[in-house]
Image (cartoon, rainbow, N blue to C red):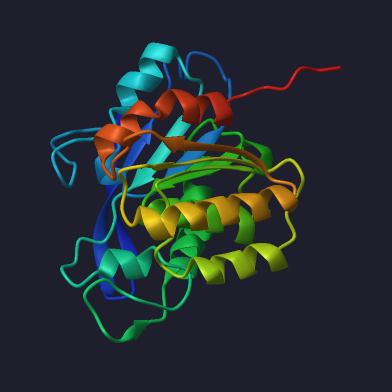
Amino acid sequence: MIKKWYVNYPAFTGVEKRKVYLYLPRGYGITKKRYPVLYVFDGQNIFYNRDATYGKSWGLKEYLDKNRVELIVCAVSCHFGENEEREQEYCPYPHICSGQTEESPGYGDDTFHWFIKKLKPKIDKRYLTLRDRENTYIMGSSMGGLMAVYGIVKYNHVFSKGAALSPAYMFRADLLLEIIKESKIVDNTVLYTDYGTNDLNVEECIPAFCKINTVLIEKGVKVTSRIVEQGLHNEATWEKQLPFVFATLMYQPLEI
């Protein structure tokens, strides 16, 4: 089941109506069972082709239903401005947006503040969630993937697991590396991440991808890292990676 509603989102360009999609797993509500929650960026692209920016979604509902994944998913649509507002909303540090010459301060921390202080408390109040860090996850692709990596590092006290598909490391990966190096990360932090060989800016992004993953591992993050043969920067490729994503996020270690 997917519930949908609009919220007034305090964007840096002014208050906007944003659509929230909430996936509830099969059997939800039959008992008082509580579930982990996965928060996802670019929510318009996650469930429905008719809502997706380029007409193709991740098909996430079908995957979760078919595999009976016991997880709540909360996805929020992005900024649809024509002047790279999405890049600014999903970048956590100063950068120069695509096609522009002036530096943007980056509003990623404002985005996380809203997710953590406004959205999460409402979801936890209204639904049968497991509210603790151990059961709170973050996921995104492209700029959303960059945010997912930043989120499990900067907001490690909130998110224990993340998934970053084709993270946009063409946007100041050097700054992200420094943030990771300076951060305190709990040793049970988990990250799934991948990048395609036919993805964007592979000459720059795959070396950055490898460097960032190495530093994350050195910091104690349990990283599942994949280079996707002929993987593209689109929803069709990301949909194919869902089995790997959820094998990582939902993995339960053996008790000794």
Image quadrant in which you'd find residue 182? bottom right
Residue 159, image x and y in percent? 61, 47
The answer to which of 218 and 164 lies nearer the viewer is 218
The answer to whether one can see residue 155 in this image is no
Residue 86 percent across, percent down from the top left: 29, 64
Q: Look at the picture and state if 211 lies above or below 221.
A: below
**Farthest residue toward the bottom?**
102
- Residue 143 figure quarter: bottom left
Q: Is residue 56 above or below residue 150?
A: above
Q: Identify the residue shown where x is 36% and y is 67%.
A: 89
Relative to residue 17, is residue 48 depicted above or below?
Answer: above
- For the C terminus, which image quadrant? top right
Q: In this view, does 79 lie to the left or right of 167?
A: left
Residue 101: percent from the left, percent from the top? 27, 85
Residue at left 58%, top 20%?
33
Is 63 situated above or below 57? above
